[in-house]
Image (spheres, coloured by chain):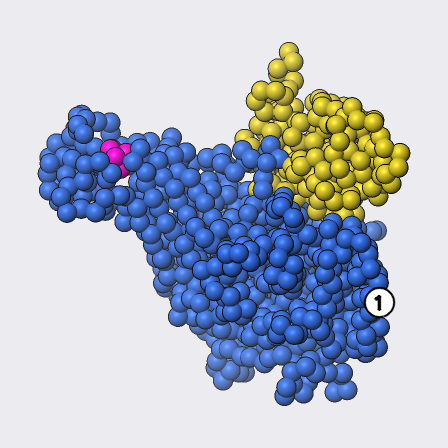
Amino acid sequence: MTVTEPTSRALDEIKIGGMGASRRRVEDNRFIRGKGHYVDDVVLPGMLHMEILRSPVAHARIVSIDASAAWEIPGVRLVLTGEMMATRNLAWMPTLSYDTQAVLATDKVRFQGQEVAAVIADDPYIAKDACEAIVVEYEQLPVIVNPTQSLAPDAPLIRDDKVGQVDNVCFTWQVGDQDATDRAFAEADVVSRIEMHYPRSHPSPLETCGSVADFDRATGKLTVYMTTQAPHIVRAAVALIAELPEHLIRIVSPDLGGGFGNKVPVYPGYVISILASILTERPVKWIEDRTGNLISTGFGRDVYLTGEMALRKDGRILGVRMHTDSDHGAFFGDAQPSKFKIGLLHSAFACYDIPTAHLTARGVYTNKAPGGVAYRCSFRVTEAMFFQERMVQAAADDLGMDQAEFRRLNFVRDDDFPHRTPFGFLTDSGQYAKCLQVGLDAIDYEGFLREKAEAAKNGRLLGIGISCMTEPLGAGNSREYDILGIKMFDSAELRVHMTGKAILRTGAKTQGQGHETTWAQIVAHELGIPAEDILVEEGDTDTAPFGMGTYASRSTPVAGAAIAMAARKVKAKARQLAAHLLEVSEEDVEWELGRFYVRSAPDRGVSIQECAMAAYSNMPDGLEPGLEANAYYDPPNLTWPFGCYIATVEIDPATGVWDVLRFVAVDDCGVRINPMIVEGQIMGGLTEAYAMASMQFITFDADGNCIGSNFMDYLLPTAWETPGWELHEVVTPCPHHPIGAKGVGECATVGGPAAFVNAVMDALKGHGVRNVDMPLLPDRVHEALQTRGDVSGAPPIRTDR
Amino acid sequence: MTSLFEEVPATADADADVPVRRVTVTLNGERRAADVEPRLLLAHLLRQGFRLTGTHTGCDTTNCGACTVLVDGLPVKSCTMLAVQADGHDVTTVEGLAGPSGLHPLQEGFKDEHGLQCGFCTPGMMLAAKALLEENPDPTEDEVRFALSGNLCRCTGYQNIVKAVLWAAKRMNGSEQ
């Protein structure tokens, strides 16, 4: 090939869709045409349909199951019960938290909605008919719906299946320095104390869970199309648990209609559909209905906190004490990768310079749905930051200090990194005071305080709430984070074709975050190949490199880093090819975006595309042909983005309805790959924060009936009530990430709720109210105003104390 | 073929002996017919019967709006309408939103304003928005928010969806002048 000279100079990164370009999304081309391909769109020849019969009661012994009438219905191919699963050792399965979970109940049902039987039939209507024809006789048992009942001395034992389990406690755990913390409290001028409940919530992606299992007897191959955020973990689990050969298992996660943590665990429905396909030797589709999704799959939160802060008169925080009681439902099925029993709840107070802290945590079983998930956060980080910011506001109020000033005084300073948090994490970078100032300026803090005071004279209730936090993302380094023993690295595989186009595959799995768009931008940034020339594929374990999937905002911190590293390997080889083409030694070759050139003669250069062609057609002697690389990235640490969220509200004292006047978000997520997508993620996260603060919760009545089992009862905000969002940014690059990114998808959900609640509490200040637990439904706010007191626990019944 | 439905030529005669009902619809401008069980939902006829999978089902209770289609131009949640109720009517799904060439301005607007993330609510959102713009070609932001309040989105926080609809309105008004 001929070397063109002189060639063009460095490419304009924005024009080629590189880092910083608000590139329009590639995946949208199919979604706007209705051509997305979700699990329910998968149709295979001879496919059967599965429906699950669920328990109507929360705690009962199963006396008998009579499925004979179901078998009689034409079109029914198979009815599975726990007894039949047990003959294949599949009635129970391990959870991601080293507990066990029933696949189909054998002895007892332990929560309303538990899987009792499954019907496989020619169409879903017949399968539903057959489920209704199954007669189950239950002998009801006393029901436990909160930790207080669970811990009572005479409480019935929920997990009588577990040898050696004598009570309903599933763990106790602690972290921090108890002695030093006790000393800090002894020396304190003021101790601020608050109790609160972070209610149970459900991620509710618009697409429910489902699978299409296809076992081929002839080849021995099992293919499962399923709604999973982590297809490789599923393959590993199936290989390790079901003892099927890993090379004959193919997990395909097609387009996902949202995930938010809900699609991390392995649910009984997946397992049953796999066994059903093996037994029937036909593809079996299971698509969960919305009620099944809400009452049986991974919920978030449900943690009670007692928090105490030791304070000096001048406003410095001397120490923090926290105790949590977390409600895990019937099986300890937390989907989390850390060795810490309460997840990363002890990441609380990471942005504050606090000498010491101590946390005790206790988890309990109840007759509620199992499987806590990290609902749009790293596990328990949403609770951590909510508790932190509510405690901070309560402490500022107790000291009579301005809430912004109190935060500023206690922030970790910009020059104090790396910083060891009071619970032992290591944070690396941030400009906390600057972020806060950007937010205060944007909302016109002083101006609002004047407006609020003026309004108060007319009986109007205005409030302003601040929430600041740095949260740990991107699990994680392999020293501390694993799932089933598999370390939390991630991967990328980049293959550059001869014409300079490329295919990139990663071990992550997009659920709407736009990986197909942003991943190409990282490659464009590293190699100067236009983003539009790069095809991104994920989700098929037969083709994608092994990775741990997408949750905990780990895609960019981990897989994104792997992409950069793979691209750099490709660039290193391209440099050898360039030297060959330019007939100089490698040391004499320089790089600018998109081209190598001779240092002493910048006009003499070759493009990355020319190097690619040479890799297939004109490689130097001794150089392996082809231009591709893979990378497995084990992050040195978590990443720590920072967010400052400020809400202003007005409460109508007559009704308890509160309106958001303005909401300002300042996010420092490090370097932004695609600002448009980052802002989209923040706005989506803020909306979930508003949802949790205002309306969205799952609760139970005394009989264990789930209140919130459909979208008529489980309230999600619509376009009508969702506030408008004002976004601002500060950029502090992550020092240890190859492209300086920190991750962003969950910050707003984590940090947002406290801003709303603090704002409403600020408006109620002076009315005898210290805390109203979420959600801040109008009747609860109204009750607090009327009674001049706190409103605690999970409505509509008080399930605490 | 399952018992739920069987697509038949639009010109075929109904067989009175079969315990199914003949449904004939004008689907995205084309006459289509199927013999269906009377209890079959329109959403399922569209998805499984006619293989138009752009119509999604998200909640089963008429709340989420992912299954929104237009029946005679009006937005309908097709998970709560029986297929037989659509007999003789005009049905538009997302697959019929674009004209013979190119994209509908709403489709362009949703892409340009980043009005979607996972894409699951998008077809229903666009069809609800189409009905709004036919009735009110120049809506305010509040009118858009109100018109879309029957459609849930879990990803975007709606702000960019609203912008997308206003973008489309502007484009459609511009092209009419």
Chain B drawn in what color? yellow
Residue A612 visible? The answer is yes
Q: Is residue B30 above or below residue A480?
A: above
Identify by letter the chain in blue.
A
Q: Is residue A244 above or below residue A37?
A: below
Mark 1 residue type = Val
- Percent position (x, y) of residue B115? 59, 36
Residue A751 visible? The answer is no
Q: Residue drawn at (81%, 38%), measured in percent from left and top?
A: B36
Q: Nearer the viewer, residue A666 or B158?
A: B158
- Percent position (x, y) of residue B24? 80, 28
Q: Which residue is mark 1?
A: A135
**Residue A594 image-quadrant placement:** top left
Question: Does residue A258 belong to the magenta stretch?
Answer: no
Q: Nearer the viewer, residue A328 or A678?
A: A328
Q: Nearer the viewer, residue A407 or A125?
A: A125
- State the quadrant of the N terminus of chain A: top left
- Tell me which chain the residue with mark 1 is part of: A
Magenta stretch in the rendered image: A607-613
In-image side of A367 versus A184 (left or right): right
- State the quadrant of the C terminus of chain A: bottom right
In-image side of A737 versus A407 (left or right): left
